[in-house]
Amino acid sequence: MQRTLPRTTLPTFSRDAAFSHLLTMAQRIYLWRQRSRTRRQLARLDDRQLADIGISPAAREVELSKPFWR
């Protein structure tokens, strides 16, 4: 005899909701990777290059101290 769960206890996700959730997660991962990449690039700049783009060394340190999700 096969035992099944009542229909009310199964999660009810529509296909659109599931796709929306996956898209949101993909966008979040893309943003995290982009932040990580740009912060690595920022870490490689010297003081002259920082001055050219208008960022102080102190502002760079603040940005580099942030985790990738912020």
Image (cartoon, helix red, strand yellow):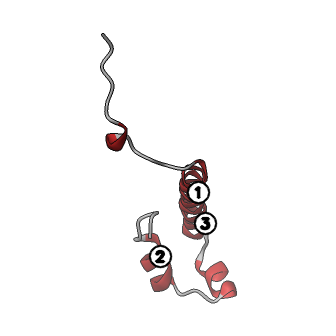
| Other residues around mark 1 within 10 Å, as few (<14) / some (14–19) / many (≥20) | few
Nearer-the-camera pick, 58 or 65:
65
Identify the element where label 3 is drawn: helix
- Residues at marks 2 and 1, CA–CA distance in whole angstroms: 31 Å
Give the image location of residue 42, x and y in percent. Answer: 58, 70
CB contact under 8 Å: marks 2 and 3: no
The kind of residue on which mark 2 rests is Glu
Task: Pick out the residue farthest to the right.
Answer: 52
Count every numbered label the image shows and give the total: 3
Give the image location of residue 11, x and y in percent. Answer: 40, 44
Q: Which residue is mark 1?
A: 20
CB contact under 8 Å: marks 1 and 3: no
User: Which numbered disc, 1 or 3, marks the residue that appears first in the sequence?
Assistant: 1
* Direction from residue 63 to residue 16 in the image, left or right: right
Q: Which residue is mark 2?
A: 63
Q: Is residue 14 above or below residue 39?
A: above
Identify the element where label 2 is drawn: helix
Q: Is residue 1 above or below residue 39?
A: above
Residue depth check, mark 2 versus mark 1: number of the one nearer the observer: 1
Residue depth check, mark 1 versus mark 3: number of the one nearer the observer: 1
Q: Kindly identify which numbered label has been placed on residue 28.
A: none
Identify the element where label 1 is drawn: helix
**What residue is rendered at 44% in x and 47% in y?**
12
* Direction from residue 65 to residue 37 in the image, left or right: right
Q: Is residue 54 above or below residue 13?
A: below
Q: Which residue is mark 3?
A: 38
| Other residues around mark 3 within 10 Å, as few (<14) / some (14–19) / many (≥20) | few
Nearer-the-camera pick, 5 or 59:
5
Tell me where residue 4 sits by quadrant.
Answer: top left
